[in-house]
DNA sequence: TAGGCCATCTGGTCCT
DNA sequence: AGGACCAGATGGCCTA
């Protein structure tokens, strides 16, 4: 699979207006002040904003454009949509951080994140059920603990099957230790 | 260069 | 009425 640790990208709008990028895009300013954004990313965002303004200028000149009010509403709507998607992405990131996975060097894609989360929940559910029946899984012998997890991990992550059993073993051990410690 | 992934724009629909 | 949500379209970036 491909590396997904990429900077945020911006696309020039098909419709844009009079407002300068600075005055109408909190996200872009957010892109400039976000805690996780590097200077390079801020530069990129600024550059993209400039490109948008340029496109806006070109489009403004054409006849039959939208009325100002309508355009303004659309821009506000776009901004809300961006914010909404950013929240969604933050949630995805938070989810990535709590899902154990074997490719720590590569960022999980959204679909991988969702699939692994589902499998992780299944694994934990299985653990709870095992605990509730008073039977601890043996971490040294390939426990049933993550049969669910391993199963669809292979489905979601094509290369997971190639991963050494050690990762799963470690995962089991960690869960086991956690349970013994708690 | 193709394909995967992603951000953004956009218009429609639903909800408050 | 206005905002939230959704899905399709578009185009950029990256890797094989």
Image: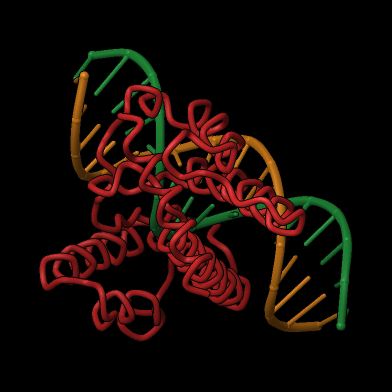
Chain colours: A red, B green, C orange
Residue A56 x %, y %:
36, 63
| Residue ID at (25%, 39%) | A3
Q: Is residue A95 left or right of residue B10?
A: left
| Residue ID at (29%, 67%) | A53
Vertical arrangement, residue A105 with respect to residue C4, above or below: above
Q: Is residue A41 left or right of residue A174?
A: left
Please name whichever residue, A2 or A147, is drawn nearer the observer in this view of the structure.
A147
Residue A141 x %, y %:
46, 34
Label tally: 0
Please name whichever residue, B13 or A145, is drawn nearer the observer in this view of the structure.
A145
Q: Quadrant of the N terminus of chain A?
A: top left
Vertical arrangement, residue A88 with respect to residue A116, above or below: below
Image quadrant where residue B10 sits: bottom right
Vertical arrangement, residue A143 with respect to residue A51, above or below: above
Residue B9 x %, y %:
48, 57
Vertical arrangement, residue A151 with respect to residue A112, above or below: above
| Residue ID at (39%, 46%) | A101
Please name whichever residue, A70 or A27, is drawn nearer the observer in this view of the structure.
A27
| Residue ID at (25%, 50%) | A5
Residue B1 x %, y %:
23, 14
Image quadrant where residue A74 sits: bottom right
Please name whichever residue, A94 or A100, is drawn nearer the observer in this view of the structure.
A100
């Amino acid at each position: 699979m491909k590396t997904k640790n990429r900077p945020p990208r911006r696309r020039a709008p098909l419709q844009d207006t009079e407002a300068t990028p600075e005055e109408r895009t909190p996200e872009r300013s957010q892109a400039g002040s976000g805690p996780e954004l590097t200077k390079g990313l801020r530069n990129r965002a600024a550059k993209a904003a400039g490109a948008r303004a340029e496109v806006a200028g070109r489009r403004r000149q054409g006849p039959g454009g939208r009325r100002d009010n309508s355009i303004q509403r659309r821009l506000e709507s776009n901004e809300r949509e961006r914010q909404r998607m950013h929240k969604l992405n933050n949630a995805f990131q938070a989810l990535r951080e709590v899902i154990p996975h074997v490719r720590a060097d590569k960022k999980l894609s959204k679909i991988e994140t969702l699939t692994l989360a589902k499998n992780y929940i299944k694994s934990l559910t299985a653990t709870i059920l095992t605990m509730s029946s008073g039977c601890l899984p043996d971490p040294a012998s390939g426990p049933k603990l993550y049969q669910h997890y391993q199963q669809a991990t292979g489905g979601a992550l094509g290369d997971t099957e190639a991963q050494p059993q050690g990762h799963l073993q470690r995962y089991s051990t960690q869960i086991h230790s956690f349970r013994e410690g708690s």
